[in-house]
Image (cartoon, rainbow, N blue to C red):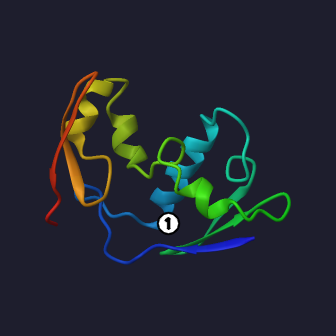
């Protein structure tokens, strides 16, 4: 079992707060699309507080930090805004669904442009 905590005050680029409900929803959506089963996608996520949640795995799992840090598998994003896009994936860059020090401003097949997130 892994007890995880979010830092207070984190927001998506669109201003929505990143709370445990949003984090767990994002991880569950990512797990549902997992290419192959791993300890996160086969585990159980439970919200335990406004900034805390638990990941319970089927067996001891020392790779959880590496799995959660895998940007190809577990991106934390605003699932509500993603769903509101209604399948218009090209609009997601402008919808600010991610968090972090750089905010994507344009995306093509070969290039990602980003600016510093000063929030």
Query: At 78% from the left edge and 60% from the top edge, which residue is drawn?
Result: 57
Task: Please identify the quadrant where the C terminus is shown.
Answer: bottom left
Please tell me in which quadrant of the rendered image residue 29 appears: top right
x, y (%) of residue 77?
A: 40, 49
- In the displayed structure, 75 sits above or below 57; it is above
Q: Would you name the residue on which mark 1 appears? A: 20
x, y (%) of residue 103?
A: 21, 50
Task: Decide if residue 14 is in sight here.
Answer: no
Q: Residue furthest right?
A: 59
Frontmost residue, 108 versus 1: 108
x, y (%) of residue 60?
A: 82, 65
- In the displayed structure, 118 sits above or below 50; it is above
Task: Decide if residue 45 is in sight here.
Answer: yes
- In the displayed structure, 106 sits above or below 100; it is above
Kind of element beneath mark 1: helix
Query: At 84% from the left edge and 57% from the top edge, which residue is drawn?
Result: 58
Query: At 57% from the left edge and 56% from the top edge, which residue is drawn?
Result: 68
Packing grade of label 1 (10 A; few <14, some 14-19, many >=20) is many
């Amino acid at each position: 079992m892994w007890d995880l905590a979010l830092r207070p005050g984190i927001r998506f680029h669109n201003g929505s707060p990143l709370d445990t409900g949003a984090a767990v929803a994002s991880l569950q959506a990512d797990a549902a699309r997992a290419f192959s089963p791993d300890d996160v996608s086969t585990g159980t996520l439970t919200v335990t507080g406004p900034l805390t949640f638990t990941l319970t795995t089927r067996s001891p799992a020392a790779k959880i930090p590496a799995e959660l840090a895998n940007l190809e598998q577990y991106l934390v994003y605003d699932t509500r805004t993603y769903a509101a896009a209604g399948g218009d994936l090209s609009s997601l860059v402008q919808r600010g669904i991610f968090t972090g020090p750089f905010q994507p401003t344009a995306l093509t097949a070969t290039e990602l442009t980003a600016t510093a997130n000063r929030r």
